[in-house]
Amino acid sequence: MAIRYFPQSEFISMPWKNGGGSTREILRFPEGSADWQWRLSIADIAADGPFSAFPGCERSLTLLEGAGMSLQFADRRCDLRPPYAACDFAGEETPDCVLHDGPTTDFNAIWRRDAVSIHVERRAMHGSLWCVPEPGVRWFVLLLSGSLALKDDPDGPQCVPGDGLLLQPEPGAPRLMLEAYGEALWLKIQQR
């Protein structure tokens, strides 16, 4: 299983056109493509306002920092409050965002529903974790708290909160063992 390390210091920051915040892109696939299948990022939301539309996509949003926000959809409302509340919705929806008490930071996964499926899960971790390769499946891990490293590999990445790892299957590669303590978002990214 191949592994790629994404330290938060290397996330690419892009201000929003409306001035209401900025996005720090972690990864898009294919990389460098304007026509990506999926994109992972962290948004710093500084002001109330509508979300952008992403037709043909699905979205998952997880609150990372701040007092939270409310997303007002045409037919429902989603309140995101600490710690780590989440909301999944179609990219065609453009909810109005109202901050509860100042700026927030959230993790965003956006994917083309005809290309991949992504499942986001918050997990507690304590000790050794086996990662077994599955055909057509990648895993992305965003560390929320604690530490995460490759077991028995002192030269491998030593993740701190905010860092990410992409785990990709390789033909004939053995399973991978991680040593992890704390909490993380685990994303299962499966090709359709």
Image: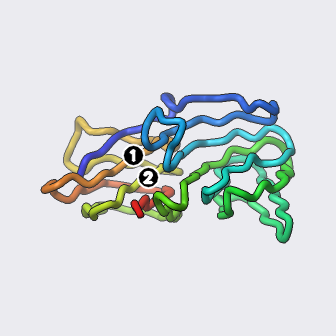
- Three-letter code, disc 1: Leu
Query: Viewed as shown, does residue 14 lie left or right of 12?
Result: right
What is the crowding at mark 1: few (fewer than 14 residues within 10 Å), some, or many (at least 20)?
A: many
Quarter of the rendering containing residue 23: top right
Residue found at x 69% / y 44%: 105
Vertical position of residue 45 compared to residue 55: above or below: above
- Mark toward the start of the polypeptide (1 vs 2): 2
Vertical position of residue 67 compared to residue 121: above or below: above
Q: Nearer the viewer, residue 95 or 11?
A: 95
Label annotation for residue 103: none
The residue identified by callout 1 is 165
SS category of the residue bearing label 1: strand
Residue 39 in picture, x, y percent from top left:
53, 46
The residue identified by callout 2 is 141
Q: Residue furthest left?
A: 172
Query: Viewed as shown, does residue 104 lie left or right of 153?
Result: right
Residue found at x 40% / y 60%: 191
Residue found at x 52% / y 41%: 35
Residue 103 in picture, x, y percent from top left:
79, 41
Using the rendered image of the protein, determine whether residue 126 is visible from the camera's viewpoint.
Answer: yes
Residue 30 in picture, x, y percent from top left:
43, 41
Quarter of the rendering containing residue 12: top right
Q: Is the Cβ of the residue at disc 1 closer than 8 Å to that at disc 2?
A: yes
